[in-house]
Image: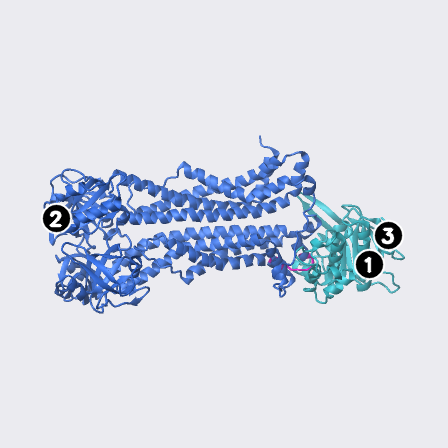
């Protein structure tokens, strides 16, 4: 987002740590990450494998709770929320897009979207959500009848159909070829623009950073650098 | 040396311990059912054959009124007859105590010169009779034990109206009394069927039967024509009051033993198949999923150079372990059940060498069938893995294909929300698995119903017989036929409120060349104490004119109302008459004809006589009345209904409750095996989908609801199917009972259906709790980050 008005911070993370027990060793996946996200902006998290970006995204999305530090979504404290509270947070505020789509194979495209609109308080119409990703004509197809790019666009439609405040995308183009990946990024940028959802996107791919308002680089479990782009590039301009 | 592949196998098995365990338990149940029932059946067969062989059980049996000993030589001359044993068998009152008189027993003569040539007896305690002693008896061991009669005790016997003092010198059993049941009773009761053996001269003297016999046992020559022999014997004995010769299969003890063994054999060959089929299905479901999870390890093994054969062997070995574990558990539990069943049978069947035997053949067959069940379930999946090219195995499996089926195109799922639609499509995508799973649940339910329905049948039977047919307090059997006034005289005893007589005559009913032997009963008009009851409790009046027959007898003889029935009254000098069939009555046991007592008196050319009397007595006088009756020389036996009922309950309850327990455990094991494995596999196969839903904001309960809802549909369809199947299985089981002996009603109480449903639902709930816990532990992040 590039605006002159002072940006509203919707999410504050302070000194977040997260330790996992892997077999018999403790792995410190986050070592004190700080981050603020502003309303309606699109940010990209860059970083090598193991830098902690997925862990951070999981904490932001309420899939997990930090070992220490503090995390607030507007006035909700997510630091030590119960499972029920996290479920409600995800249900009401967060949309997810994964590298491997995770569509329900026994439901059609429209029904996969309806899965979310059924439980969200103020959702889009499922067809409207599919319109956003350009897939209304494929709405009655099952996942096995869709290409990888189409499946990912259905996943995006499903994520945005609840009008999320926060849209989190973990390597959304990771399993796609360049042309399809570009199409998906285009959809994400449009959704961010048209619905105003704060969007965080994880990628290995530094070229994608040009799409963002701000770019966070992660290294060794911390946010190493934060840079702002004066203007956001168009997905069609990106090369990788 | 343990190869790495073997280690992998063992660890995979340990990792899936619960799942593998439930499958092994189902296999184990099948093997246990097979081993216990088949083993008990074979043990019974062995003990029976050995006993019949060693103690020379006869082939043909006939009772008659009286024939001179010279007739014996003519019996020996009948073509096809190998051996003839003639003897005296007479009704006797055994005076076991002053307070009680069991129904009439039998006294049997033993040759003075040694042992009988046929139907020998086994003296297993004490000693044989001393030759020439007329005051010694051998006594049927079960009766002696039931009444606490010891060797050396004095036993007064009332023979032909005279009391004799005898001394018990030995306990004995005989192959003709393996199932010792008193004539006219429908459950064996050791307290109520007494048999004593005495020197033939003593019996002949007491019953004035010197130089005569009234009972014959024959052994046939190999290849003889049994029907021809029966005909010749009947022709020969007709002038001597022959009651009709029967083959071994109609001899009451052998008939009931054979019938019980037939039922056991039928169960032994059906119940285990149900379990092993379910086990094969579970192996198929569970292994199929295990293989999906092992695509990458399998591909890696192949990439390393393992052959198809080695991979296939690896998986077969894994399944074989499950089969062997199941077989070993089954053999252990089956042997235990088998011993318990054999012990129960020993209470009913006096077979001296009866003990449970687990022979090598049974062990080998058990191992073989459990392997067959396990491997047949695994075959398809293992071949599929073995043939999968490594590169394909390295790829995640293609998303399962779904489409709108016929049901959906017709709008069948339109009302459902997405979650229900997920479950519905998943079920419809694999209709065969759905059906097998429903069939499995149904089998589990049916097993519990079958286990318990015997109780209902016996309760219903008890209700009809003790509440409706036998309304008396005391029943009396006279030593012969007594005049009406002797019956009325019993009404003068203190405390007797009402007395009614009945006359029973042995009869052969024939029509169109078919005949059956039974009793012709002469009823007093409007009886209150012993009643003729149309199942279940509708009182029928004996006809003033003509004859009413047991419905089964009408069926066997192919009669319709109005037909003339030939009734041959058995006994010397008794007539054969033609009576019109006035109706039929559905009775629970036996084959009887019913006429008015006046009709019977007219047929027999005399006044009204009675062979039995039924008394209604004030409870406080019951003991005194029994004691008074027991002292009357004309009385052969006295029964108190309360004592009979108590003994009946004691006999049936123990057996039944053991059976209910075992069947419930088996049914629960089946249900857990199916529900747990299904839910577990569904959870594993759909972990990604369910985790996605959790991420989208679905709660744990909502997500569990999708998996469990689908399983609940299986259970909810399987339950009623199983209740119906249980009813049908009960009908099939009852059809193995000879309808001419007993007609057990297939009555299944609502509480039995409720109980079966509760057992299966309980098992399902326990399985679901496990699954719910696993949904709670679903690692959202890990699941979604992996390719599958």
| Cα gap from disc 1 to disc 3, whole angstroms | 13 Å
Decide if residue A239 is in sight here.
Answer: yes
* Residue with the most extreme top position: B1
| Cα gap from disc 3 to disc 2, whole angstroms | 121 Å
- Please report whichever mark, 1 or 3, sits nearer to the chain's N-terminal start: 1
Q: Secondary structure at mark 1?
A: helix
Q: Nearer the viewer, residue B548 or A63?
A: B548
Q: Secondary structure at mark 2?
A: strand
**Are tags 3 and 2 found on a single chain?**
no
Q: Specify the colour of chain B.
A: blue
Percent coordinates x, y for residue B694 in the rendering? 67, 57
Q: Chain letter of disc 3?
A: A
Percent coordinates x, y for residue B304 in the rendering? 67, 34
Q: Nearer the viewer, residue B784 or B393?
A: B393
Question: For the magenta stretch, what is the residue range?
Answer: B694-704
| Cα gap from disc 1 to disc 2, whole angstroms | 115 Å
Which residue has dot 3 on it? Answer: A238
Which residue has dot 1 on it? Answer: A189
In the rendered image of this protein, does residue B333 appear above or below residue A149? above
Q: Nearer the viewer, residue B572 or B99?
A: B572
Q: Secondary structure at mark 3?
A: loop
Chain letter, colour cyan: A
Display colour scheme: by chain
Give the quadrant of residue B134: top left
Q: Main secondary structure of the magenta part?
A: helix
Give the quadrant of the N terminus of chain A: bottom right
| A151 lies left or right of B206 | right
Q: Chain letter of disc 1?
A: A
Residue B462 belongs to magenta span = no
Q: Are marks 3 and 2 in contact (CB under 8 Å)?
A: no
């Amino acid at each position: 987002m590039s605006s002159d008005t002072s940006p509203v911070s919707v999410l504050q993370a302070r000194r977040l740590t997260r330790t996992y027990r892997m077999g018999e060793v403790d792995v410190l996946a986050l070592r004190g990450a700080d981050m603020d996200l502003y309303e309606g902006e699109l940010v990209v998290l860059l970083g090598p494998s193991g830098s902690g970006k997925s862990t951070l995204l999981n904490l932001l999305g309420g899939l997990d709770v930090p070992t220490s530090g503090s995390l607030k979504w507007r006035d909700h404290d997510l630091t030590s929320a119960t499972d029920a509270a996290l479920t409600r947070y995800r249900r009401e505020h967060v949309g997810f897009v994964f590298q491997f789509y995770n569509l329900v194979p026994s439901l059609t495209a429209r029904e996969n979207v309806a899965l979310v609109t059924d439980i969200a308080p103020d959702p889009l119409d499922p067809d409207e959500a599919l319109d956003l990703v350009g897939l209304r004509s494929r709405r009655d197809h099952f996942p096995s009848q869709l290409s990888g790019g189409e499946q990912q666009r259905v996943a995006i439609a499903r994520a945005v159909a609840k009008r999320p405040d926060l849209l989190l995308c973990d390597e959304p183009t990771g399993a796609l070829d360049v042309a399809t990946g570009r199409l998906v990024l285009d959809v994400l940028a449009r959704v961010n623009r048209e619905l105003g959802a704060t969007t965080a996107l994880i990628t290995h791919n530094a070229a994608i950073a040009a799409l963002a308002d701000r770019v966070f680089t992660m290294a060794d479990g911390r946010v190493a650098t934060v840079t702002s782009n004066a203007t956001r590039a168009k997905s069609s301009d990106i090369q990788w | 040396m343990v190869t790495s592949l073997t280690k992998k196998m063992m660890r995979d098995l340990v990792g899936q311990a619960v799942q593998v365990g439930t499958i092994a338990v189902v296999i184990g149940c099948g093997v246990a059912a097979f081993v216990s029932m088949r083993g008990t059946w074979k043990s019974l067969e062995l003990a029976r054959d050995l006993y019949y062989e060693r103690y020379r059980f006869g082939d043909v049996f006939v009772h008659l009124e009286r024939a001179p000993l010279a007739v014996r030589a003519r019996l020996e001359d009948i073509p096809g007859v190998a051996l003839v044993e003639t003897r005296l068998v007479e009704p006797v009152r055994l005076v076991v105590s002053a307070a009680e008189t069991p129904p009439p027993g039998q006294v049997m003569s033993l040759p003075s010169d040694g042992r009988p040539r046929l139907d020998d007896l086994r003296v297993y305690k004490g000693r044989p009779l001393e030759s020439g002693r007329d005051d010694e008896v051998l006594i049927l061991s079960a009766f002696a034990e039931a009444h606490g009669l010891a060797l050396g005790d004095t036993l007064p016997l009332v023979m032909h109206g005279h009391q004799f003092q005898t001394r018990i010198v030995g306990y004995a059993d005989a192959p003709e009394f393996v199932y010792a049941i008193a004539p006219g009773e429908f459950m064996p009761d050791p307290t109520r069927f007494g048999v004593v053996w005495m020197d033939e001269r003593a019996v002949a003297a007491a019953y004035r039967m010197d130089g005569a016999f009234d009972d014959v046992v024959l052994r046939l020559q190999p290849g003889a024509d049994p029907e021809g022999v029966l005909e010749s014997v009947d022709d020969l004995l007709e002038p001597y009051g022959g009651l009709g010769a029967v083959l071994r299969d109609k001899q009451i003890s052998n008939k009931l033993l054979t019938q019980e063994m037939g039922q056991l054999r039928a169960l032994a060959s059906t119940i285990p198949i149900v379990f092993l089929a379910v086990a094969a299905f579970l192996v198929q479901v569970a292994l199929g999923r295990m293989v999906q999870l092992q695509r990458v390890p399998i591909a890696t093994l192949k990439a390393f150079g393992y052959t198809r054969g080695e991979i296939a062997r690896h998986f077969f070995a894994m399944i074989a372990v499950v089969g062997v574990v199941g077989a070993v558990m089954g053999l252990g539990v089956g042997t235990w059940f088998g011993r318990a069943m054999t012990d129960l049978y020993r209470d009913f069947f006096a077979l001296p060498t009866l003990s449970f035997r687990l022979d090598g053949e049974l062990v080998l067959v058990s191992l073989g069938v459990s392997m067959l069940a396990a491997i047949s379930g695994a075959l398809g999946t293992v071949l599929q893995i073995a043939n999968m090219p490594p590169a394909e195995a390295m790829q995640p499996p293609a998303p399962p294909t779904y489409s709108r089926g016929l049901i959906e195109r017709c709008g069948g799922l339109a009302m459902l929300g997405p979650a229900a639609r997920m479950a519905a499509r998943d079920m419809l995508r694999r209709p065969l698995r759905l059906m097998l799973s429903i069939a499995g649940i149904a089998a589990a339910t049916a097993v519990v119903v079958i286990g318990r329905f015997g109780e209902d049948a016996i309760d219903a039977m008890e209700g009809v017989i003790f509440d409706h047919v036998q309304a008396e307090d005391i029943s009396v059997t006279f030593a012969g036929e007594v005049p009406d006034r002797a019956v009325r005289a019993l009404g003068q005893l203190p405390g007797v409120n009402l007395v009614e007589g009945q006359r029973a005559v042995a009869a052969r009913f024939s029509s169109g060349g078919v005949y059956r032997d039974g009793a012709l009963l002469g009823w007093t008009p409007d009886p209150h104490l012993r009643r003729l009851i149309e199942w279940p409790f509708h009182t029928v009046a004996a006809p003033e004119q003509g004859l009413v027959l047991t419905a089964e007898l009408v069926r066997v003889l192919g009669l319709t109302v109005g037909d003339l029935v030939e009734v041959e009254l058995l006994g010397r000098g008794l007539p054969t008459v033609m009576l019109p069939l006035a109706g039929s009555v559905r009775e629970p046991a036996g084959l009887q004809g019913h006429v008015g007592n006046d009709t019977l008196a007219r047929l027999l050319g005399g006044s009204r006589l009675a062979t039995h009397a039924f008394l209604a007595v004030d409870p406080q006088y019951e003991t005194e009345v029994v004691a008074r009756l027991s002292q009357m020389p004309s009385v052969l036996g006295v029964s108190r209904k309360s004592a009979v009922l108590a003994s009946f309950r004691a006999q049936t309850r123990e057996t039944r409750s053991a059976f209910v327990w075992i069947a419930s455990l088996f049914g629960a094991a089946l249900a857990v095996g199916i529900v747990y494995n299904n839910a577990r596999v569904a959870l594993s196969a759909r972990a990604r989908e369910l985790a996605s839903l959790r991420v989208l904001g679905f709660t744990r309960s909502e997500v569990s609801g999708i998996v469990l809802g689908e399983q609940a549909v299986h259970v909810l369809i399987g339950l009623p199917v199983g209740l119906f199947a249980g009813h049908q299985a009960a009908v099939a089981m009852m059809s193995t009972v000879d309808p001419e002996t007993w007609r057990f009603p297939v009555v299944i109480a609502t509480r039995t259906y409720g109980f079966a449903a509760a057992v299966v639902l309980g098992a399902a709930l326990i399985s679901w709790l496990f699954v719910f816990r696993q949904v709670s532990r679903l690692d959202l992040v890990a699941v979604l980050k992996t390719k599958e």
